[in-house]
Amino acid sequence: MPAPPGREEVELYTRTFLTVLRSSGEVRLRVLERVHLGMHSALHPLGAEGRLDSGALLYSLHRLPPVTLEMEHVLMGQSPDQLLRTGMDGVAWEPVAAPGRRRRWWWDPASKTLAVALASSSDLDDLVPTLVALQIEWNKAHRLLRSDDSTAAPVGLKDARQRLGIGPDDWQRLKALFGPRMAEFLATVGRRPLDLRLRLVGGSQVAYARATREWWGPIGEVLSQEGLRDRPIYFVSSNAHCLVNLLSGVARERSEHVLLWAEGSSDPELRELVRLQRRPDSRISPENFLYYAARLWFDAHPRARQGRTQEEREEGIFHVEARSGTDVAAQVIVLDRLRPGAIDPRLGPAVAADLRAAPQVLINIQYPLGLGAYHILRQVMEATDRVEGVYILGKAATLNADVGDVLISDVVHDEHSGNTYWLDNCFSFADVAPFVTSRSVLDRQRAISVRSTFLQNRAYLDFYYRDAYTVVEMEAGPYLGAVFEAGDPSRYPTDEQVDLTRPAMEVGLIHYASDTPYTQARTLGARGLRFEGMEATYAGALAIATRILRRAGAVPTPTGG
């Protein structure tokens, strides 16, 4: 496939920041601003203009910890140990989190330094443009809020919104992001420009592989302690809650408490969902609503959350938190220990005797970022030679559908390797549609795995759309590279058409649409998915769980299926 228009600018940007970050000392982020703007990122369309790009600002803030108000330095490395040896030793680092990006972050208020562990080179592709976009838009806001009179009073919220030119919806999202610190955020932006310094420690492929092996350690311990090492494995990349809710009865057994709490919640959206769900003509699945509300209920009831973990262990569900620089939690689910009567009724009539005889173990992970997917799946397949199925459920931008729709692809072009993978996706419209009432399901799609959400522009997207690529995401290509290596003596190739219609294990790929870049709609990075994506997420999870249980012999296969 020829290089798309706009690709040269993207490659120039990546070459620039990779060569700049080879420096053994700190580099000033401003050196990357011009090449960032020259790329004309589809996610940062107003970057070169004098007016504020509130979408890009919100997207960046959502993917960084709230310490951005004080941050002056960013230290990037491949493991906590590596960072400790470099600049963290003897410092009282505080773990911090970003609302829209799972990474291991630490903060040192004394030096105003944010340290971050990188799980793969995709983290670098994602983090650097995010920081550059933040600095560009922060400094625009600084100029708009700055008063020529040094004795002037701080700008009020109403005046600040007018000066920044932020619409009402984005203004509410900004207020939701900072909460009571909103006035402090605006005062800080108005008081000082941003001039970040970056430093990269390491960056070798060996270190990424080592970090992934450390990530696998606790999962391997669970398999060994529970006598599961020799069992066949189903690998699922999704999230931390869907499959657990579908296969465990813990949330449903607390449904009365959860629903009563939701009715009196201070969250207006939650109360409105209660009302809508109770209408006779409601199209909201009661199970999906219960699972959504239960997540919030467990967050508000820590003791109940502790009890849930123990109950799920008794049902054969083991939660494994990440202990390395790879911030990807996992669950080990033992099929023959599940309670058939507790399984979500939409999965069909589970047969108790067959389920007790099912030897398979399900390893479910929170979907990683980009090339982290390749490292993780390859590590799983190195640690066990009995992976029988790989099922991927993740978010994607859509060029032809709407937010919340379900997208099923059988062609994936991977920008990392240049390969185009042709696969026999085990999922189709018929597998997902029964679980969808208010969204569309589109199968026979084509996906492109990009290097980063920022590393694409309009010409780039137009090129792929003209060739019928409609799904834009980050993990499918790297996963398929690992699948290829499971059945071939060589490493995955580059710039080739790769036939994966007969892979070493069954492969299923489902995405739910989270962004619509062609309409300049606000992305999930700016606003969060909330309940809007629950139907699509659970539809995909239900299709995956049904497939696994059917293969394990616990759910009858329909006639002709």
Image (cartoon, rainbow, N blue to C red):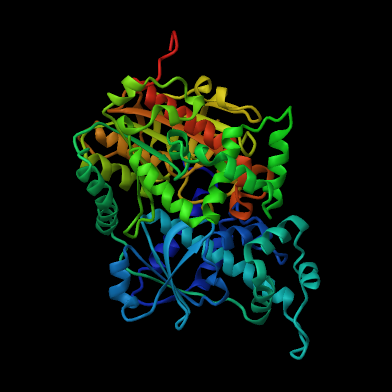
> Is 233 or 159 nearer to us in this picture?
233
Q: Is residue 396 left or right of residue 518?
A: left
In front of the other: 238 or 311: 311
Quadrant where the C terminus is found in the figure: top left
Q: Residue furthest top?
A: 559
Q: Considering the image in quadrants, where does the N terminus appear? A: top left
Residue 169 pos. (x, y %): 74, 55
Q: Is 158 or 465 nearer to us in this picture?
A: 158
Which residue occupies the foreground of this view, 119 or 460? 119
The residue at the point 66 percent across, 61 percent down is: 176
Residue 398: percent from left, percent from top: 59, 38
In percent of width and height, residue 436 lies at: 59, 27
Above or below residue 20? Residue 5 is: above
Whether residue 423 appears in this view of the structure is no
| Mark count | 0
Residue in the picture at 52% in, 37% down: 252
Residue 134 against residue 303 in the figure, above or below: below
Instruction: Residue 430: tell me if it is visible.
Output: yes
